[in-house]
Amino acid sequence: MDEVYRVIQEDIQTIIEELCEFKGKITDKTFLVTGGAGFLGSWFCDILNVFGARVICLDNLSSGSKKNIKHLTKNKNFKFINADVCSFNTHEKIDYIAHLASIASPPLYQKFPVQTLDANVIGTRNMLELARRNDIKSFLFTSTSEIYGNPPDEAIPTPESYYGYVNPYGQRSMYDEGKRAAESYCYSYFIKYNLPIRIARIFNTYGPRLDIKSTSQYGRVIIKFIYQALNNKPITVYGDGKQTRSFCYITDQMEGLFKLFMTPKINGEVVNIGNSEEISILRLARKVKKLTKSNSKITFQPLPPDDPRRRCPDLTKAKKLLNFKPKVSLQKGLKRMIDWQKRIR
Ligand code: UDP
């Protein structure tokens, strides 16, 4: 377990070094992190904890796990609340809200479509109201590249100004349209109440704590391929594998998110956060197989409906506004993920 935690500790240290300019704004302040026991949420809690913030971690454990935050629970500045973001309320004074709560894995949100929509629409409205009552300093909403749907080649890499090509009545709509409605709520509270909201459109992200046990069933692609390769099971490419994604390592993602959350005078901004190194899923499968020295066969399975053909962020705005530029190449990040997987097996 210590060895496992060491990988996370090293990554936390990398993130902290990038963010030290914000320490003064974080120490002793109270942060509500919704979805705080999830993959990204737990990294959020860790970073805030190192900077000496008081953290209220809200999660109903629908996709998050207590395992991700267990090490923080003895800390007097950390409080875990098992409750639903749609109905949660508190009279505690809150300075900042990071609103991450939502199922994000396609097979899982398809299994829980109503909860996914509710967390994003009703949950976001509830958190915005809480923010309003607390005279909050900054409200970060984690939106998604999914709001762009299935962009044509002319919109790749995709800038924030692209409106999206989304199926409102289909397999991904509960997540895509939920996030789009949530963005609209954020915008409305920004213009109506001058609430200091910032929206991150997060592109595919990977790193330690992606849970292989649940992802082997509900599979985000990187962790699933690594798991399959390390166990010499078939690597399951959907469709012809020509669809692309651009994968961002957790340390870069956290740097981008915190910069967006904490940088002064950028209220109301919407920014893509990710990595623009685009790769086809078939090439990803081959790369994972090679790096793990696996004997796994690459097999082909039907492509799920509405699976976006290409996805790659335009990061011009992130660079200009936040001086954000991802540093971890896919090659380097994959090696680190493989190392992590080997340790937790
Ligand atoms: N994918 C795949 N095999 C799998 C799981 C996923 O080929 O076993 C593909 C999936 O169809 C998609 C890409 O990998 O094109 C990324 O899937 P993921 O679920 O990680 O996230 P998405 O970007 O689709 O939300």
Image: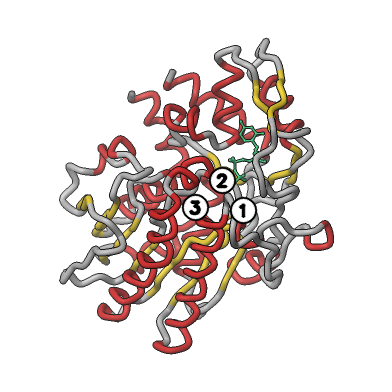
Q: CA distance from mark 2 to mark 1?
A: 7 Å
For this view, does 316 lie left or right of residue 121? right
Which residue occupies the foreground of this view, 283 or 107?
107
**Whereabouts is ligand 1, in terms of quadrant?**
top right
* Figure check: 218 above or below 313: above
Nearest to N terminus: mark 2 or mark 3: 2
Q: Is mark 2 within 8 Å of ligand 1?
A: no
Q: Position of residue 151 (x, y in %)?
A: 74, 59
Q: Are marks 2 and 1 in contact (CB under 8 Å)?
A: yes
Circle 3 SS class: helix
Q: Amino acid at mark 1?
A: Gly
Q: Which residue is mark 2?
A: 205
Residue 60 got which mark?
A: none
* Figure check: 133 above or below 163: below
The mark tally for this picture is 3
Which residue occupies the foreground of this view, 290 or 186?
186
For this view, does 280 lie left or right of residue 177? right
Q: CA distance from mark 1 to mark 3?
A: 10 Å
Q: Which residue is mark 1?
A: 274
Q: Amino acid at mark 3?
A: Met
Residue at position x 15%, y 50% in the image: 76
Nearest to N terminus: mark 2 or mark 1: 2
Q: Which residue is mark 3?
A: 254
Which residue reaches farthest front?
A: 169
Circle 1 SS class: loop
Which residue reaches farthest right?
A: 154
Circle 2 SS class: strand
Categorize mark 2 by other alpha carbons within 10 Å: few (<14), some (14-19), many (20+). many
